[in-house]
Amino acid sequence: MPAPTVRDHVTALESGELPAYVYDLTALQAHASAVRAALSTRVELYYAAKANPEPRILTALADTVTGYEVASGGELAHVRTVVPDAPVAFGGPGKTPDELAAALALGVERFHVESEHELRLLAELAGRFTPERTANLLLRVNLPVGPGTLDGVPLAMGAGPSPFGLSPDRVDACLAFLDSPAAARLRLRGIHAHLASGLDADSQLDVAGRIVDWSARLARRHRVPLPEINIGGGMAVDYAAPGSRFDWPRFGAGLDRLLARHPELALRIEPGRALTAYCGWYATEVLDVKRSHGTDFAVLRGGTHHLRTPVTKGHDQPFSLLPADAWPHPWQRPTVRDAPVTLVGQLCTPKDVFARQVPVTELRAGDRVVFAMAGAYAWNISHHEFLMHPRPNFHFLPQPAPVR
Ligand SMILES: *Cc1c(COP(=O)(O)O)cnc(C)c1O
């Protein structure tokens, strides 16, 4: 259920102001503070901007997070503009020379280097454009975390063939290069490994332990200090259980045990979804209700061109109903009662489905629907231009004080 502030806000909107994204910044800050409080000071918390780069979201997090992880030149420029003083880590495969040069010029705090070629490119560009500075980097490694560890994980990015990070058998070559004069402007700080999205606290801790052990062995073998390890993001968000959360206290306690075994180590995490998914709501209204070959459909204003998440993840987007009693027409109101209903949008494609066969006690044309968990990988991953419907409105609660 949305907080009363969100519910009241949605109820007060005119039909023509829907659909609307409503972001509960108070809830976001409370959640982020709870996450931060569950982690020791030896764990740095970065926010992965690609989950939701809305300026108001980035600034709402600014007091809580250590910095931001960006994965493109666009995100880098955006984050530097919105939160100019915040540390930035620049990751992602396929960084262009222009993006790397811009990142060097902006002095990003950490590069997450994804390949040997990228390492050489960075060294060359650093020598050419910013010879007065040192570029700090982590090597992103696609670690074999052990058979079965990532089985059943929604979005595995490593531990098998993947375009992300270095194959572990190429790391020695990178360390040799980093030791050469060609890499004079580069400084290796540690290891990065973002291996999957959707891990619960115990699986995350298991993976973290393996990353730290592997890195410690590497450091010993090569006699290089690796004081930092970034274990990535991917903390699970369960769309089937909007009330449950990743167990941050359990995770934080587990990281403490890991840190106790490695007194020199600084750990970093970079969650996206688990920080912002819960603060966003996509509110709209039922335009039509109809029965087709035995199945009840509710057609909503808007669609998955605004909220693509249920299509990409293959889930039912959780929602609440806000009944609206006004019915301005003389004919009977299209209604479904005590039956499962499929919620679709206005797009002319059978893929435009928010949720399938969800039981409702009553759903009528004109009622409002508020989709939960629309704060991450929602608007910004959606194909807005398809069918040329109007864009949603965006609201950030609390509303800013009126400027006088
Ligand atoms: C996407 C991504 C993240 C954030 O993942 P979430 O599942 O949103 O927590 C963190 N690090 C890297 C390298 C990523 O690509």
Image (cartoon, rainbow, N blue to C red):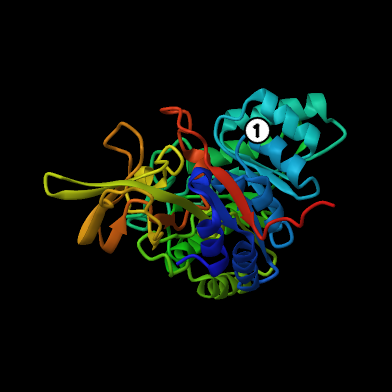
Give me the residue at 71% from left, 58% from top: 66
Instruction: Pick out the residue farthest to the right.
Output: 132
Q: Note whether residue 377 is visible.
A: no
**6 on left or right of 264:** left
**225 on left or right of 335:** right
Which quadrant: the N terminus? Answer: bottom left
Residue denoted by label 1: 74
Instruction: Pick out the residue farthest to the front.
Output: 330
- Above or below residue 203? Residue 387 is above
Give me the residue at 42% from left, 28% from top: 386
Q: Nearer the viewer, residue 33 or 126?
A: 33
- Above or below residue 148? Residue 141 is above
Residue 56, image x, y percentages: 68, 50
Q: Nearer the viewer, residue 13 or 267?
A: 13
Q: Nearer the viewer, residue 201 or 230?
A: 201
| Label 1 neighbour load within 10 Å: few <14, some 14-19, many 20+ | few
Q: Nearer the viewer, residue 49 or 346?
A: 346
Q: How many marks?
A: 1
Residue 90, image x, y percentages: 66, 41
- Identified by mark 1, the residue type is Gly
User: Which structural element holds mark 1?
Assistant: helix
- Above or below residue 248? Residue 207 is above
